[in-house]
Structures are given as structure tokens and as C-alpha cells.
Image (spheres, rainbow, N blue to C red):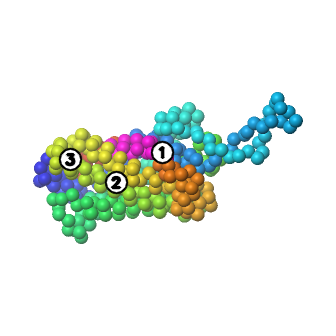
């Protein structure tokens, strides 16, 4: 594809109205979230595994008896019960013990999150990128890495501050098991009300700072990486601008996002799901998690996280690119 044709397509995106951009991005993200939500639920369960030790009942010899044993529930050491093993094992265990519908617990909050979050971080990306481009005055024929990174950080951070309550509710639903002792909510609306009433407004924005950090990083890894890889493939390999191009760029973006965001994602999930007062803050959560479970804990759920982010990026970007062809062009007529 020639540089002139690529520039023409970019011009169509930039002249599309902001509401059209927001709606297109939000629709593509909701579709991707629905398809990949079970992977996200598996990731959350693996990330919080190890946070709460499960007490097991030990068998001890009965008094004055060597041949018989009795249950002694007192003075039993807390041991870690590993309930979930691997992506497939986690999904299988959840389905067998709690039913297939459990894999979609929190879907409503997840879709609400995407409508708020991805609409802003992706829908406004080109607009913000153009703004920073006018300030930095980078070469328009180049890759404009600095401009893209600044735009990704800005839209990613801003989107989180708006969509944070939906993320908190989504994580609470996904983390809740049938046997969990924590609070279970009957609906997303009831969850918003209960958290606001019992934990205050701060409860709905719990974990906002690590989430801002996580999603700003993810935004750069996903959107900027996709943007750069797509342009490089167009310029240097002359790959046609079709599903093959979008798929290739989306896989690279998903891999990059998983690698850089996993540690912050685990801390965010743990902190959002923690009872009130368990941690003094996100940093305290990270320190205690590292001291208790080691550095490997920061990459818990890496495989489902990778599977989810790559598949989410593939579905989202292909959907987004196809929607752009229809909606953006139609909005110009």
C-alpha cells in the first residue's frame, strides 16, 4: 500500500466525528469482551489464588490410642490449597463446580466497562495523537513513536478514572465462588449501591492508581504497538490492508500488553478484591504478595492473561477495522 493511500485512510478516521469514534470503539470492544470473557474470569481466579490460605483439618492420633485416629480441628496450621491449575484446568474446574454461567459472572459490568473505557482510550486516540503531533511536530512520514506513546498514556489513564467503578464490580463478580465467604452481589446495580454504601465513594475507585498505571501501560502496548506494527507491515512488507494485516498486528499487540502489564494487573486484581482494611494500599499489597509468594506471584495467571489479551485484541481490532470501513466512510456521506 502506498504512503498516499495510507494517509488518505488516516484522514477519513480523523474527520469522523467524536461520537462516531466512541461508538465504533465501544461496540468492537464489547463484542471482543463477550467472546473472551471466560478467559478473563479464569485469569482473575488464578491471580487471587494464594491470597487467602485455606485451613485444612489434620488427622492426629487419639489420646492413649495408637491404632485409631480422630479429627482434631484445633491448632491446625493454615496450608495453601491449590484449586486451579492452568487455563484449561481452571475453566474446567469452574464449569464443573459452579456451572458454565459462572464463567460469565460480571459480564454486565465488563460490557459497561468497555463502553466507558475502550470508547475513550481507543475512540479518542487518533484525536489526542493529532493534538500531541501538533505540539511535538514529529515527521509525519515517520512512525511518530513519541506522539503515539503520549497519546496512549493519556487516553488510557483518562479512561480508567471514568470507568474504574465498573472494573471494581467486574473483578468482585469474577472472584466470587460459591464457597467464598466474601460478600456476593445479586446484580451489578446492587453491587454499585452496596460498595458505595459500605465502603464509600473510595470503595468504587479502589485500586484506581494501580489500574491507571496498568491500563496506561496496556494502552501503549496494545494501541501504540498495533498502530506501529500495522504501519510497519504496510510500509515495509506491502501486506494488503485486510484481515491478515489486522490479525498479525493484533497478536503482537496482545503479546506486548501481556508481558508489560501482568505484574500491575495481578496487584490490581488482588487489591480490588481484598476486604476493607486488608491492605494499606496497592503498594502494600504488592510488597506483601511478593514477600509471601515470591516474584512468580506477579505473573500468576500469565497463560490465561496471554490467551485472553491476544484473543481479545484479535477480535477487537478485526471488528474495529471492519466497523471503521462501514461507519467511518458512511459518516462522510
Outermost top residue: 67
Describe the element under mark 2 as helix, strand or loop.
helix
Marked residue nearer the N-terminal end (3 or 1): 3
User: What residue sits right under mark 1 in the picture?
Assistant: 301
Give residue 221's mark. Answer: 2
x, y (%) of residue 52? 62, 49
x, y (%) of residue 71? 78, 37
Q: Crowding near pointer 3: few (<14 within 10 Å), some, many (20+)?
A: some
Displayed quadrant of residue 307: top left
Magenta segment includes 154 = no
* In the image: residue 71, left or right of residue 37: right
Of 212 and 303, nearer the camera is 303
Describe the element under mark 1 as helix, strand or loop.
loop
Image height check: is 194 above or below 103?
below
Residue in the image at 17% along x and 63% along y: 139
x, y (%) of residue 316? 33, 45
Give residue 121's mark. Answer: none
Marked residue nearer the N-terminal end (2 or 3): 2
Image height check: is 159 above or below 187?
below
User: What residue sits right under mark 3 in the picture?
Assistant: 233
Marked residue nearer the N-terminal end (2 or 1): 2
Residue in the image at 48% along x and 35% along y: 88
Q: How many marks?
A: 3
Of 31 and 43, nearer the camera is 43
Please state the extent of the stretch shown in magenta in the rendering. Answer: 300-314
Q: Crowding near pointer 2: few (<14 within 10 Å), some, many (20+)?
A: many
Magenta segment includes 308 = yes
The answer for how far apart the CA atoms under marks 3 and 1 are is 31 Å
The rendered magenta stretch, by its main secondary structure, is classed as helix
* In the image: residue 260, left or right of residue 85: left
Amino acid at each position: 500500500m502506498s504512503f498516499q493511500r495510507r494517509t488518505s485512510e488516516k484522514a477519513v478516521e480523523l474527520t469522523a466525528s467524536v461520537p462516531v469514534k466512541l461508538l465504533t470503539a465501544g461496540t468492537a470492544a464489547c463484542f471482543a469482551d463477550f467472546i473472551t470473557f471466560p478467559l478473563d474470569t479464569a485469569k482473575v481466579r488464578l491471580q487471587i489464588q494464594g491470597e487467602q490460605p485455606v485451613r485444612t483439618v489434620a488427622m492426629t492420633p487419639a489420646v492413649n490410642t495408637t491404632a485409631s485416629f480422630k479429627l482434631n480441628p484445633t491448632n491446625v496450621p493454615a496450608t495453601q490449597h491449590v484449586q486451579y491449575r492452568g487455563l484449561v484446568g481452571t475453566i474446567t474446574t469452574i464449569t464443573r463446580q459452579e456451572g458454565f454461567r459462572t464463567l460469565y459472572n460480571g459480564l454486565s459490568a465488563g460490557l459497561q466497562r468497555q463502553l466507558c473505557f475502550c470508547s475513550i482510550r481507543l475512540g479518542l486516540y487518533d484525536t489526542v495523537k493529532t493534538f500531541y503531533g501538533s505540539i511535538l511536530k514529529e515527521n509525519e512520514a515517520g512512525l511518530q513513536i513519541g506522539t503515539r506513546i503520549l497519546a496512549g498514556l493519556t487516553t488510557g489513564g483518562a479512561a480508567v478514572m471514568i470507568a474504574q467503578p465498573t472494573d471494581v464490580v467486574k473483578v468482585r463478580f469474577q472472584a466470587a465462588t460459591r464457597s467464598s465467604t466474601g460478600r456476593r452481589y445479586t446484580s451489578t446495580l446492587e453491587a454499585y449501591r452496596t460498595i458505595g454504601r459500605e465502603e464509600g465513594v473510595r470503595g468504587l475507585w479502589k485500586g484506581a492508581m494501580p489500574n491507571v498505571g496498568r491500563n496506561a501501560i496496556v494502552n501503549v502496548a496494545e494501541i501504540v504497538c498495533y498502530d506501529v506494527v500495522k504501519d510497519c507491515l504496510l510500509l515495509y512488507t506491502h501486506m494488503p490492508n485486510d484481515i491478515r494485516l489486522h490479525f498479525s498486528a493484533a497478536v503482537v499487540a496482545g503479546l506486548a500488553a501481556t508481558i508489560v502489564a501482568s505484574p500491575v494487573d495481578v496487584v490490581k486484581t488482588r487489591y480490588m478484591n481484598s476486604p476493607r482494611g486488608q491492605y494499606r494500599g496497592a503498594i502494600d499489597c504488592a510488597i506483601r504478595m511478593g514477600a509471601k509468594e515470591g516474584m512468580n506471584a506477579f505473573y500468576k495467571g500469565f497463560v490465561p492473561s496471554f490467551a485472553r489479551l491476544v484473543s481479545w485484541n484479535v477480535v477487537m481490532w478485526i471488528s474495529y477495522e471492519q466497523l471503521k470501513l462501514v461507519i467511518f466512510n458512511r459518516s462522510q456521506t
